[in-house]
Amino acid sequence: MAIIVALAGIGGGVAALVTYNEATKIDRSNPKVVLDEYLRAALITKDEVGVNLHVCGNPAGLVPITILREEFDRRERDFGVVVLVTWGAITGAVNEEESTVTTTLTISGRKDGAVISKRSEVWRFGLVSEDGWRVCAAERVAEPTPSASASP
């Protein structure tokens, strides 16, 4: 009887471990999902481990996001605000080895619960397929400058 109980306990433990592994497994099958998780780790939770789980082997192209995060931290420290970041739809082209996608980051500064500043920036991200999709590059897309028009 003790053997049956022990085997049942081991079987239950293995089943729990497999279930946990599947529930916490990183989904790298879709570049848009990977970018969403990367942005969450880099800009919201400031989770360096989470960031590293989603970047390519040579993440030097992600320095602009590091600089942006440092800007948020500096503003929070210097002005006593909370910087919040959201992003919209992630769109772009995907092929078997590379993906280039864009999204709009909306950055707001809040103090005492009130929004005191807000801006939107379009960003382009490069992802590569390295044992699943990984974020490899980020750049802010320049806003088009208004052209001079002839006045009547």
Image (cartoon, rainbow, N blue to C red):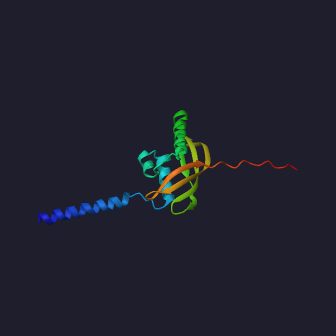
Residue at 24% across, 63% down: 12
Picture coordinates of residue 121, whole percent (x, y) = 61, 48
User: Can residue 112 be seen in the rendering of this structure?
Assistant: no
Residue sitting nearer the eye, 132 or 114? 132
- Give the total number of marks visible in the rendering: 0
Picture coordinates of residue 79, whole percent (x, y) = 55, 34
Picture coordinates of residue 51, whole percent (x, y) = 45, 48
Residue at 46% across, 62% down: 29
Residue sitting nearer the eye, 137 or 24? 137
Query: Please, which residue is most extreme toward the top here?
Result: 78
Q: Is residue 150 left or right of residue 38?
A: right
Residue 94 position by quadrant: bottom right
Residue at 54% across, 63% down: 95
Residue sitting nearer the eye, 77 or 149? 149
Residue at 23% across, 64% down: 11
Figure quadrant of the N terminus: bottom left
